[in-house]
Amino acid sequence: MLPLLANAEGENAVSELLGKFGVTWPFFIAQVICFILVMIVLKKYAFGPVQAMLEQRRARIAEGEDKLTQIEKQLAESAQTTAAAIAKASAEALRMINEAKQGAAAFSEQKAQEAIAQAQQILVKAEAAAKADRERLSVELKREFGRLVAATTAQVADKVLTADDQKRLNEATLIKVEA
């Protein structure tokens, strides 16, 4: 019987405390139900679409980074090809110089000078071709990078960029890339 008395006193103390704070069970339960309904509506119509949009943006950015990596890889391959062409031209020039030296006994000094001049022309042409190829790839990379930055910025900002905005953004990006 003593435990029942303690239990009754405990319930009386709890209801007295809740009464002091102005808590009534019907209003409290209604507020909990309203809170749960608001959370469900927010999750379905607010948080869900925002999270989906953020995931799409992450995917687009990752795709842009993949394209940038691919362009950098192509640029590296072009540099390797250029280096190989220069090495081949240099080897060809050295071979021609050696042939000119070996044939110096049979040929006159003038023939040796012509071979050296020809080897230098091959090197100059190979370097010019490599430089032109490197510049072309650099221009393409900068153009594509500027386009990707402008497109990404437009999508992130949900704003249509004007021609002036795109030009300014491209110039700022190129300055940062070249630095």
Image (cartoon, rainbow, N blue to C red):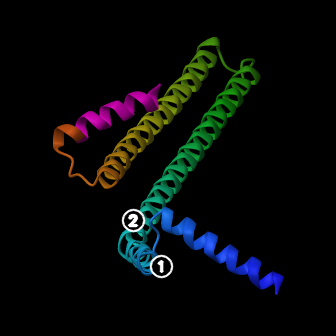
Could you say where residue 158 lies in the image, as x and y percent from the top left?
Answer: 27, 55
- Count neighbours of disc 2 (C-alpha within 10 A) and say few if under 14, some if 14 to 19, many if 20 or more: few
Could you say where residue 166 lies in the image, as x and y percent from the top left?
Answer: 24, 41
Q: Name the dominant secondary structure of the magenta segment.
A: helix
**15, 29: nearer the viewer:** 15
Q: Residue at x 17, y 37 (%)?
A: 164
Q: Considering the image in quadrants, where does the N terminus appear?
A: bottom right
Residue type (three-letter) at the residue carrying disc 2: Val
**146 on left or right of 106:** left
Which residue corresponds to mark 2?
A: 50
**60 on left or right of 66:** left
Closer to the observer: label 1 or label 2? 1
Residue type (three-letter) at the residue carrying disc 1: Trp
Q: In the rendered structure, does residue 75 fall within the stretch colored magenta?
A: no
Which residue corresponds to mark 1?
A: 25
Q: Which residues are magenta?
A: 166-179
